[in-house]
Amino acid sequence: MPTVSVIVPCRNERAHLEAFCSSLRAQQLPEGWTMEVLVADGHSDDGSRAWLDEHAGRFGLRVIDNPQRIVSTGLNRALQASRGEVIVRMDVHTTYASDYIAQCLAALQASGADNVGGPWRAQGEGALSSAIAAAFQSRWLAGGARSRQLDHSGWVDTVYLGCWPRVTFERFGGFDETLVRNQDDEHNLRITRGGGRIWQSAAIRSTYRPRDSLAALWRQYQQYGYWKPFVIRKHGGAASWRHWLPAGLVLGLAGSLLSALLGAPVWMTVPLPGVYLAVVLAASLAIAAQTRWRHVPWLPLVIPACHLGYGLGFLLGAFDAWSGRGPRARMERLSR
């Protein structure tokens, strides 16, 4: 019988393990397929490892160690221990439709792609988390990225999570263990630059649970921005305008503040902060009008946390990547 191997990186996800494993157990595989699940635990200290060990038999899990603690090393450890012809990545922060794996297998067969996945759908629980999810799904934050377009099916540059024939890893290699974030984007870039193809299917459905505090959101987006220049340096490519825009915003706002401190006239210091504030307020109202008006108090905080966190992280990462000093220790710790 053909086997699909589910590889799962995990660190300090105790609050989400029960829901994740329940949606995993509900998977309805196509006839003739069997499934194995490998969870790479990164030395969790919140009770996750004890829970996994206790419930491994109940949910059919194989728990393996990930001493380096980050996602890329966990994925590679699980990949090395797997035996399936098809590899599916799942994250604990996400729950899945019962036909998630079946739709991944169908998309692989129909497209002949080297990697397939579904759109990145976010759904919060509390007021702040729901506002973060609403912003996450919006063009104001996603910048038109197809991975956030829930109805998009077609050829893309990257997808959320992923499903690969094993031969893809034999051809393009595993995940870059020097990257704490963006290891999936880097791997997809390696695939497309190597002549491979990536397909997104709207029928592959999952729901991601975003962070539930502004501080955690800031740290998350700062790390997203920080590790992007390391990917760019590795492949010698130019960043998309979506990556440079938050960095330019941070530089512009910093310049406005410095000019004000140095006594520059108002016409030099006010326009950019004023325009950005107006854009944030307009975006907040537009997102709330499409989702829920109760998001309005949070969105003017959520949007800048993402924009400015990413922009500052990108600038720090660009300095560290091209100065040769290497990654900062605090950026090597996966944020939660």
Image: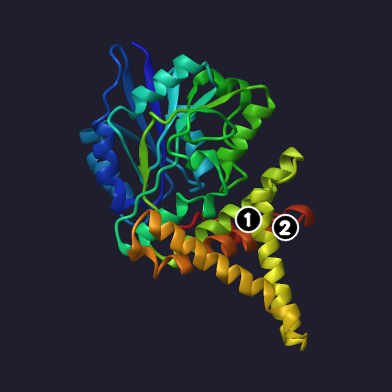
Mark 1 neighbour class, 10 Å CA radius: few under 14, some 14 to 19, many 20 or more: many
Could you say which quadrant of the image residue 151 lies in?
top left
Amino acid type, mark 1? Tyr
Q: Nearer the viewer, residue 67 or 126?
A: 126
Q: Is residue 328 visible?
A: no
Q: Which residue is mark 1?
A: 226
Residue at image coords 62%, 20%: 171
Seen in the picture, residue 139 relative to 234 is either above or below; the reply is below
Q: Of label 2 and label 1, which has the lower sequence position?
A: 1
At which x and y percent is residue 289?
39, 58
Seen in the picture, residue 215 relative to 323 is either above or below; the reply is below
Question: Which quadrant does the C terminus fall into?
Answer: bottom left
Seen in the picture, residue 123 relative to 58 is either above or below; the reply is below
Residue at image coords 51%, 47%: 70
At which x and y percent is residue 99?
30, 27
Decide if residue 289 is on the left or right side of residue 69.
left
Q: Label 2's element?
A: helix
Amino acid type, mark 2? Asp
Find the residue positioned furthest to the bottom: 263
At which x and y percent is residue 191?
62, 27
From mark 2 to mark 1, how far is it between C-alphas? 9 Å
Q: Which residue is mark 2?
A: 320
Q: Label 1's element?
A: helix
CB atoms of marks 2 and 1 within 8 Å: yes
Seen in the picture, residue 280 relative to 60 is either above or below; the reply is below
Q: Is residue 128 visible?
A: yes
Find the residue positioned furthest to the left: 58
Q: Nearer the viewer, residue 211 or 243?
A: 243
At which x and y percent is residue 202?
42, 31
Mark 2 neighbour class, 10 Å CA radius: few under 14, some 14 to 19, many 20 or more: some
Question: Which quadrant does the N terminus fall into?
Answer: top left
Decide if residue 314 is on the left or right side of residue 67.
right
